[in-house]
Structures are given as structure tokens and as C-alpha cells.
Image (tube, rainbow, N blue to C red):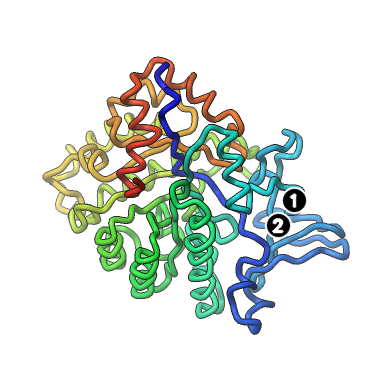
Amino acid sequence: MPLTDDIKMISIDDHLIEPAKLWTDRLPAKYHDRCPHVENITEERIEPFYAKTVHLKPGMQIWRYEDILEPNVGLSATAGTDVKDRNFSPIRFDQMRPGHYDPVARLADMDEDGVWAQAPFPSFPGFCGNKFVFAKDKELAHLCVRAYNDFVLDEWCAAAPDRYIGLIILPLWDQEQCVVEIERCAAKGARGITFPDNPAGLGLPSYQGTGWDRVFAAAAAAEMPLSMHFGGSRIVPFVSEEAPQAAITALFGITLFNSMAELVMSPVFVKHPTLKVAYAEGGIGWVPYALMRMDQVWESYREFPLENNVDPDRRPSDAVREHIYSCFIDDPVGVEQRHDIGVGRLLWESDYPHADSLWPNSRENAKKVFADVPTDEVRKIVETNARELFRFH
């Protein structure tokens, strides 16, 4: 069987639900009413929630941070739930499996799923801490970033250092402090950095200028890849307001194609030749087409006088194969075309505890996905590529 029992599956995209007291336990009391904290709803009311509204009822729990009121929702905490509960309705901590927010309990869920290690992304802060970019009080936001990273490294990963890959967030609005935080967390054992798939979507500098030079240099020096999750820049594929969530989910890969095209047609990898990027939750079936299309355009445009950020000496596909990793849960089209991408640049994800996760059947499903793939290639995709990328040995 290609996925043999000795292979330890490593997922590079999962999510932790932050414990209710993560920030209040770590910040001075004067911040407790403004830092992220959980409130128990005692009276019925309607509150805005992104482009929709949430009907809050007594007994519900919600996160509050500055002017933000946001619940944990069913789609973000689906492991062990009935399909009918996978929606945007608020969910309480006592309605979740403890493995959603407790690192020790998570290990039991990973064992049940046949998964050895995980690299969890944040939840409330956004997939790269992007919620803090828009904070009114940037001093408090910076403290919140540090508190989150301390929790991840000192508590979550410390619970099982051989089974958790520590991904940190950065104070993205301050490049100098980003460098300080990278160096601080690298010394504590951080393995990767969550980063916007397209920072311009957050009103931050794009890949095209010099705004990220010091940050990317620090990441490369620390050998910490940039883990870019779909939605980290708040850019999602355009659909009508009437479109179902399934339509948006089906288009996740398009957003990462957007990121890939701008990234490889920018000076980033020329300036930082050892920098690595890992895309999360976009699948891989689109990647062969993306490589082909970018090379076609590169061939036509590389001598254009206005295309001064296009590297005329290296095809985009070569840049991708040298610097960018892509991951998937269940992508038979991509697996069939794996050699067009490069087996050494593929990673696996379980997405626990989100709606795309196949928990507790991730390993059993992977056996089917890899049924016709040689064991040495399976081992690379689900284990050793991740170990090498994140220095997780």
C-alpha cells in the first residue's frame, strides 16, 4: 500500500481556536476590556457580522475586541459535529471538542485521525493576524500579537514539541517590529510565519516595492517560510451577494493563483533567493495550468519596457518550483499531475477543525488518494517535504 503505516503524516494547515482567556491571562488588567476577550450574552439583540448580521441570544458566547463583536462559528469548529450544525451560527466553547482549543486534547484527535503533526493557523486574529492591522490602538495590538505568539510557542507547541509546528503572526503595520518579532520568536523555536497571500489587500505594501525587504530578509535568515493561507489578505473571489458559501469555497485556489502570479513576477525572490512560501487551503489542481500560463505571458512580456519587475532570466515556473510549496487535502487532479508541479514542492493538509476537514478519516481518505502513487513520493508529500521546509526533525 503506497501510504504505509510507518509514514507519519504532517499537516501544514490546521487551525486552533484561541482559548477564551488567551489575551486576558497575558495582558495587564488595564487592557482587559479592550483586548480580545469572550463575553457571555445575557440579552437578545442583533449585531452586525461582516456583511451579515448575527442574532445574539442569551447563553451565546462571542469575542469582543475594540469595536469588533465576533463569535466562533459552526463552520470553524466542525470536528465531531453534525452536518446540519456546519453554518455561521455562533458556537460556545462547551459545544466544541476540547481538541479545538486545547493542545493536549488535540493530540488525541490527531491520533484518531492518523495524523502525526500539525501546523495550526490562528482563528480570531485572522489567518495571519490581519485583524490587528486595523486596530485603533496599535500599541495594544502589538501586545496582542506577542501574547498570541507566546501562547503558541510556550504552551501549544510546548505540549508536544515533536508534534506541533509553531506558526507566528506579525505586527504587519510596522516592518521594523516585524523583524524584532521574527528574531524573538525564532529564538523560542518558531518554525514559520503566517503572512498575507496579498498584503496589498490589507492596505499594506505590495510585493513590488521595498516595503517588505527587511521582513523577508529576516524570515530568510531565520529559515522560516511564509505560510500564506487563503483569505489572509481578505481578498476572496468575487461572486454575487446571493451566491452560496459553496461557490466561494470552490474558488479558493483562484485567490492563491492571484498571489502566486504577483509574487513570482516581482523582485521578491531575486532579492531573497532562499525565501520559501507555503500556500494553504488552495488545492493543487490549478497549479500546472498556472505554471503554463505564467510562462506563456512571461515569454511575451519579459522584454516590454514597462515590465521592469519581471525577471527576464527566469521563467515563473522555475521560480515557483524553487520557492513555493502548495498543499491539498483531497485533490485527485493535482495528484495525477504532481510531476508537472514537482513532488518536492507538494504538502498535505487536514484543515482540522474546519468544514473541509475529513476528520477522523483523514488517513483513510489519503490511502485512497495515493492508491496509485509510489510510496517514496507519498512519503515526501505527506511527511518529509514538511520536515525539510519547517526544519521539523
Q: Residue furthest bottom?
A: 30
Cβ–Cβ under 8 Å for marks 2 and 1? yes
Considering the numbered disc 2 on the image, is that residue within a helix, a strand or a loop?
A: loop
Residue at 31%, 24% in the rendered image: 376
Residue at 44%, 69% in the rendered image: 171
Residue at 63%, 72% in the rendered image: 25
Mark 2 or mark 1, which has the lower sequence index?
Answer: 2
Pointer 2 residue:
71
Pointer 1 residue:
91
Residue at 67%, 41% in the rendered image: 78
Residue type pointed to by label 2: Pro
Residue type pointed to by label 1: Ile
Q: Is residue 129 left or right of residue 347?
A: right
Q: Is residue 79 left or right of residue 163?
A: right
Residue 130, given in percent of the width and then of the height, sits at 50, 62
In front here: 224 or 227?
224
Quarter of the image containing the N terminus?
Answer: top left
Q: Is residue 371 above or below residue 61?
A: above
